[in-house]
């Protein structure tokens, strides 16, 4: 019987990273396959244990169990299929068969090996329907699922060439083992995770402060998702640096706040993604995870507080969901107030990330009660240094390619 | 039953405020969020859908503010120009007609 409350998930932190000297020998003579950035990020996540107990890309049994039951075949709760896809032509072209080992390359250099345990097909419509609760093609997760190639390849992943994280992301790269060591060094036993893909406004700030109180926490881990971007999103540099400046500017004391990044392409799966986030942050060493309104949602596919309720429907994950409602600006309270406490709902002035973005786009500086001036300054600096004149993702920002990590030539080998 | 209204927030910077003041329309602005000025241009459900189809980067923030956000700045500039010309906030219909 799987004990879902174990931390890390499954009871043991996966670490599948080998030394360069071993790596050269390991990959000699193996077929090399280039992979897209999403799969590269997931290889790194798997190998460093972010996705414990996963040791690789899922088998058919695991995919089917995750899709239908929200568990792995082993019984451990898991909500999002983690799959490696290839076309029939690609498979035929390299004569791939079960039992082979591939070298996965990224940015023209070896990144990881994939031990091919199973090659299988899976009903993508069924996957979309269960994981996203819809087959509407406007849902980005459904589109991603429909875009998967003909077959999936399941098997263990080993990182043979750890990527270099580029500034400014380098100082926020903490795989689970290192982050747990940081928490221990600081004496933090109760850490509440904040999931974000946005630059923080004060509503976010109060969400974190409220969750800190609710969890009786020692600290808050801000864990921005860094991955695939869409035009109009904030650029990744702005997100991570803006969160960090809340600490350096003193809105959070130094000894209660930490920022580290998570490589992940958002699936916008609402409650299922909330469960996934909880598991990953448990693997990072967190004991609590805050969930506000519309967590990991998109459009109107999910009920506003579906992510709050999903944790009532699954076994105890060993990470406590801190369910929070809304923070708004109240002119009567003369500040940011909490929905469950403020009795001036008729006067409440709600604000959101989208609203703040609109304000910035209109060339207006928001007041400090809504958006901290230090955050504004960081966003403007990132606009100039990284964004080519915009703090939001543009087509030219996307054309730059992966700026977060660089896979160098494997030591002792020539670059391809 | 009145039709649902989806406000478009046009946030007022110094330049925009000066134009409104010069046109005698400064009182159209509302003070919100501890120091911001905004004018809210209403749109019907059909107008909202037309705008979102035309400008896919925009969204209707159904989760929180129930307003239309992230329209390109030049769209808001044009809407403000129409407000200044007409002295009225009911300009979205005419704006959409002007797009053809």
Image (cartoon, coloured by chain):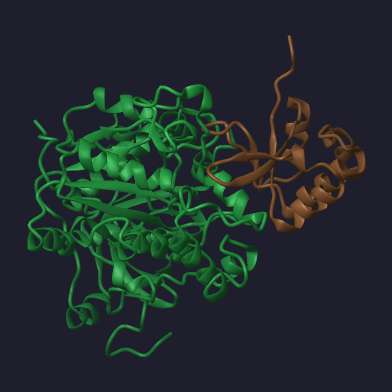
Chain colours: A green, B brown
- With respect to residue A358, does B27 lie above or below? above
Which corner quadrant holds the N terminus of chain B? Answer: top right
Asked if residue A353 lies left or right of residue A254, the reply is right
Identify the residue at image location x=64%, y=64%.
A395
Q: Nearer the viewer, residue A44 or A283?
A: A283
- With respect to residue A142, does A161 lie above or below? below
Asked if residue B75 lies left or right of residue A94, the reply is right
Identify the residue at image location x=49%, y=54%.
A87
- With respect to residue A411, does A200 lie above or below? above
Q: Position of residue A335 (x, y in %)?
A: 42, 39
Q: Residue furthest top?
A: B1
Asked if residue A386 lies left or right of residue A184, the reply is right
On the question of residue A120 being in view, the answer is no
On the question of residue B24 being in view, the answer is yes
Q: Position of residue A124 (x, y in %)?
A: 47, 37
Q: Nearer the viewer, residue A65 or A216?
A: A216
Q: Position of residue A19 (x, y in %)?
A: 18, 78
Identify the residue at image location x=86%, y=48%.
B81
Q: Quadrant of residue A338?
A: top left
């Amino acid at each position: 019987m799987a004990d879902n409350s174990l931390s890390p998930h499954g009871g043991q932190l996966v670490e599948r990273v080998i030394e360069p000297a071993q790596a050269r020998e390991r990959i000699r003579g193996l077929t090399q396959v280039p992979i897209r950035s999403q799969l590269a990020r997931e290889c790194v996540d798997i190998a460093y244990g972010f996705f414990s107990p996963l040791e690789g890309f899922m088998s058919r049994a695991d995919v089917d169990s995750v899709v239908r039951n929200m568990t792995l075949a082993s019984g451990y709760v898991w909500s999002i299929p983690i799959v490696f896809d290839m076309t029939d032509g690609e498979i035929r072209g390299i004569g791939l068969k079960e039992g082979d080992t591939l070298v996965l390359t990224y940015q023209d250099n070896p990144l990881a090996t994939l031990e091919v345990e199973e090659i299988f097909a899976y009903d993508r419509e069924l996957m979309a329907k269960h994981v996203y609760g819809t087959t509407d093609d406007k849902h980005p997760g459904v589109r991603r699922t429909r875009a998967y190639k003909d077959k999936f390849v399941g098997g263990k992943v080993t990182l043979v060439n750890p990527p270099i994280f580029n500034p400014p992301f380098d100082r926020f790269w903490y795989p689970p083992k290192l982050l747990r060591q940081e928490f221990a060094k600081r004496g933090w036993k109760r850490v509440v995770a904040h999931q974000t893909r946005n630059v923080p406004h004060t509503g976010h700030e109060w969400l974190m402060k409220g969750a800190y109180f609710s969890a009786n926490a020692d600290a808050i881990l801000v864990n921005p998702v860094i991955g695939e971007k869409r035009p109009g999103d904030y650029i990744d540099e702005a997100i991570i640096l803006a969160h960090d400046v809340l600490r350096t500017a003193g809105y959070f004391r130094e000894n209660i706040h930490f920022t580290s990044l998570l490589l992940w392409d958002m699936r916008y799966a609402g409650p299922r993604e909330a469960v996934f986030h909880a598991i990953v942050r448990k693997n990072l060493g967190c004991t609590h995870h805050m969930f506000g309104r519309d967590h990991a949602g998109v459009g109107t596919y999910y009920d506003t507080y579906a992510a709050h309720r999903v944790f009532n429907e699954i076994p105890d994950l060993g990470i406590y969901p801190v369910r929070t409602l809304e923070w708004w600006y109240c002119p009567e309270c003369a500040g940011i107030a909490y929905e469950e406490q403020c009795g001036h709902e008729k006067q409440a002035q709600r604000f959101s990330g989208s609203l703040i973005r609109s304000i910035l786009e209109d060339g207006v500086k928001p007041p400090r009660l809504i958006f901290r001036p230090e955050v504004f300054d960081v966003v403007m600096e990132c606009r100039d240094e990284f964004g080519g004149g915009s703090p939001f993702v543009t087509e030219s920002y996307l054309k730059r390619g992966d700026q977060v990590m660089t896979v160098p030539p494997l030591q002792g080998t020539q670059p391809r | 039953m009145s039709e649902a209204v989806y406000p478009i927030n046009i946030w007022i910077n110094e330049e925009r405020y000066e134009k409104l003041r010069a046109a005698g329309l400064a009182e159209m602005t509302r003070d919100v969020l501890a120091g911001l000025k905004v004018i809210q241009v209403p749109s019907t459900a059909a107008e909202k859908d037309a705008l979102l189809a035309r400008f896919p980067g925009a969204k209707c923030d159904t989760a929180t503010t129930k307003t239309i956000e992230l329209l390109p700045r030049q769209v808001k500039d044009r809407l403000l120009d129409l407000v200044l010309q007409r002295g009225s906030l009911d300009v979205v219909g005419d704006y959409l007609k002007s797009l053809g």
